[in-house]
Image: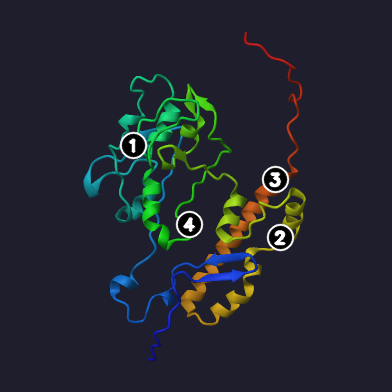
Amino acid sequence: MIVTRKHLHRRTFLRGLGAAIALPLLDSMVPAFASPAVAAASPNRLVFTYIPIGATMKEWTPTGEGSGYTFSRILKPLEPFREDFTVITGLDHHQAEALGDGAGDHARAGAAYLTGVHCKKTGGTDIRAGVSVDQIAARQTESSTRFPSLELGCDDTRIVGACDSGYSCAYQNTISWRTPTSPMPMETNPRAVFERLFGTDNLSLPPAERARKTAERKSILDLVMGQTQSLLGDLGHADRRKVDEYLFAIRELEKRIESVEKIITNTPPPSKNPPASPSSSRII
């Protein structure tokens, strides 16, 4: 067997005109004579997910303690992966309670989730919470990743004005805080997230130009096709399969975004009053 000491850099990108695709961890990225610890290393990911409406916790909480706990109904599908994750309970946030501030549970809960801080009750610009744990982690990893953090949401929201019983919308509509007074806005547009990750940013263009670019848009995979073919020729069978699966997943994501955009574009705006509905209503 001939062993060359050549290997791909962990941060290798497939590049094209205005686009870049980071690759998953490949066998070719591990040096031939690397120690077992290096060879077994994989990129770490830290994800925080928030459900603002809450959940029926008894359906999520397992019975018992230690490794022999019994899975709850909702967690049951994860039972085959028991050794790969840990369920932690007892993480209630006392600082999310009213503590004399009255109503506003939604806003307080969102603000305290990752900061552990009882936010200042205000609907103005003098907001104050705390630095969130995701941003603390981002500061430690920002030198080794393209994006220190991504703040993503599902609903189109705002972080100005008052939203919940005298609390600023900033508390309710983001869970990420760079400083105690600087909330991180959530990105809710999947196209904007895709463009940010892969570099084909058309969002700053004028509307007419953006529409033309959208109509002419190619898959990002087309933009990097030349370098992709060159790279695949130098990879082993396992790595070629992994890259193929990865690029297939990217294309599937593109198609899903395109499908959603078509639905939004072709959906007529709602009428002022639904059919057969009264022009005004009153509480009886």
Instruction: Of the two numbered discs 3 and 4 on the same chain, state the one appearing first in sequence.
Output: 4
Mark 3 or 1, closer to the camera: 1
Which x, y percent locates residue 187? 55, 45
Are the residues tagged 4 and 1 within 8 Å (C-beta)? no
Which x, y percent locates residue 267? 73, 40
Q: Nearer the viewer, residue 52 or 120?
A: 120
| Residue drawn 54% across the image and 28% down it | 161
> In 3D space, how far apart are the residues under numbered discs 3 and 1 (Cα atoms)?
40 Å
Q: Nearer the viewer, residue 237 or 49?
A: 49
Instruction: Of the two numbered discs 1 and 2 on the same chain, state the one appearing first in sequence.
Output: 1
* Residue under label 3: 263
| Residue drawn 63% across the image and 52% down it | 257
* Residue under label 4: 147
Q: Callout 2: helix, strand or loop?
A: loop
Left or right of 218, for residue 176? left
Which x, y percent locates residue 181? 43, 37
Image quadrant occupied by the C terminus: top right
Residue type pointed to by label 4: Phe
Instruction: Of the two numbered discs 2 and 4 on the same chain, state the one appearing first in sequence.
Output: 4
Residue type pointed to by label 2: Arg
Are the residues tagged 2 and 4 within 8 Å (C-beta)? no
> In 3D space, how far apart are the residues under numbered discs 2 and 4 (Cα atoms)?
24 Å
Query: Is residue 33 depicted above or below 248 in this figure?
Result: below
* Residue under label 1: 116
Q: Residues within 10 Å of mark 2 (few under 14, many from 20)?
A: few
Query: Is residue 156 depicted above or below 255 in this figure?
Result: above
